[in-house]
Image (spheres, rainbow, N blue to C red):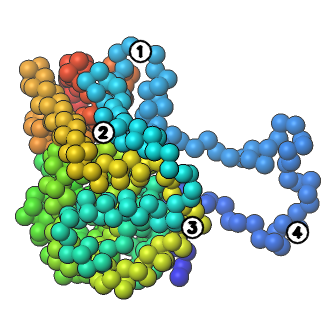
Amino acid sequence: MAPASARAAQAQPQQPSADRRLSTLVGHLLPSSPRRTAADTSATTLESFPTMASQGSSVFAALAQAPEDPILGVTVAYNKDPSPVKVNLGVGAYRTEEGKPLVLNVVRRAEQMLINNPSRVKEYLPITGLAEFNKLSAKLIFGADSPAIQENRVTTVQCLSGTGSLRVGGEFLARHYHERTIYIPQPTWGNHPKVFTLSGLTVRSYRYYDPATRGLDFKGLLEDLSSAPLGSIVLLHACAHNPTGVDPTIDQWEQIRQLMRSKSLLPFFDSAYQGFASGSLDKDAQSVRMFVADGGELLMAQSYAKNMGLYGERVGALSIVCGSADVAVRVESQLKLVIRPMYSNPPLHGPSIVATILKDSEMFNEWTLELKAMADRIISMRQQLFDALKSRGTPGDWSHIIKQIGMFTFTGLNSDQVAFMRQEYHIYMTSDGRISMAGLSTRTVPHLADAIHAAVTQLK
Ligand code: LMR
């Protein structure tokens, strides 16, 4: 097999501009200078290398300063800003009306129960993680009555939140799947192309968002998936598409499913917002369950960062729905070979919290109420921002703010307007104009509306 860099270079772009951007990204991600061979090394004298002994010099002296991450770097800049009116709408992290991070009450209770249990020890988990957590996670996303679970066709491994699940799944596919091209929506979460490129897959894009309608480019999506090579992997956001907040309708999902199955395209779902989009865990899993119900195979990356507020605990799971129970056993054995040299085995605390909550019906119910309250607060922020812009007579149609779903609004503001709002109003968001509605409160809506009004009237 050719190395990832060579495969990426060979890929023929289908949507030139999006795929050209991906190629540039690949260029940045992969090592730029050729590796030193044994012959090179022996031909070079030791004195030509800087050592720690020579004051002021460094073996890393030639290293370029890397840019901040486009999403997490927004928080770095925000933290440096002394302004009392600053607002961070960059990273997708829930905040209360008071602008504070929220630890769910049910999570606090679960942690207390774990701490009070003297029989708990700190032994290593198996490579695949906490078995109880894995079972409960599969049930949560696929449904308790899922035929795939009942037929033992699902293998689930605990991973480091959604990102870790995507990375383990990507690397597994690069090693064992016959088609190594993954199609990702244009646009998508900024980390997706990096995760999959470094997994060893070739990343290409399919049309998803239409800036003219600020909605789904459904025709473009179907065209691009129709012309993808048979068997290609396709990344799908299960709900609350990040960054656009635009999801297919159930009818559109059904058409996507039929097309993908007819071309043997392999679905790789990313579910980072189950329950967070609509407030209902089942509703937000509908797209995924349609693909499981047809008996076909798929990959599923799950995160508990947003829906249980366990961001820093890094709790997630990768499930692979296989054609048979026998295949699922062998898939799991290979997943262990991916995980062991990567991080050996996953952490214990986060999945223990999740399992404590998911297995107890009273705690589960409390969680769903807290989850619904978070989702409702975000939905109310959408309405408040929309109303505030309307009342200011801000030019433009802002109805997409209330139509889009989930944590983010893809405002349509351009990078100059974003920079202006940071400079003049101390409002921080990603340069693509995405704002985290979860970072907004009734108190900060007027300030944001003033800033957007000024940006669109002063910078066209
Ligand atoms: C986001 O998109 O803001 C979140 O998923 C956080 C992250 O890691 O980028």
Please state which of the two labelled residues, at mark 3 or mark 1, is closer to the viewer: 3
- Percent of width and height locating residue 294: 16, 77
- Give the answer, above or below, for where 345 lies relative to 429: below
Dot placed on the residue nearer the N-terminal end, 2 or 4: 4
Alpha-carbon neighbours of circle 1 within 10 Å: few (<14), some, or many (≥20)? few
Q: Is the CB atom of the residue marked by disc 1 within 8 angstroms of ligand 1's nearest atom?
A: no
Q: CA distance from mark 3 to mark 2?
A: 32 Å
| Marks 3/1: CA–CA distance | 46 Å
The earlier-in-sequence mark between 3 and 1 is: 1
Measured in 3D between alpha carbons, the distance from the residue under mark 4 to the one under mark 1, in whole angstroms, is 56 Å
Q: Which residue is mark 2?
A: 106
The mark lying in front, picked from 4 and 3, is 3
> Dot 3, how many residues are within 10 Å of its Cα: few (below 14), some (14-19), or many (20+)?
some
Q: Residue 380 at what x, y percent from top left? A: 14, 31
- Mark 3 highlights which residue? 340
Q: How far apart in space, not on screen, are marks 2 and 4 (Cα)? A: 61 Å
Choose the circle earlier in sequence order: 4 or 1: 4
- For disc 4, the marked residue is 42
Residue 254 shows in this picture = yes
- Where is the C terminus found, in terms of image quarters? top left
Q: Which residue is mark 1?
A: 83
Q: CA distance from mark 4 to mark 3?
A: 34 Å
Secondary structure of the residue carrying tag 2 is: helix
Vertical relation: 365 (above or below) 337: above
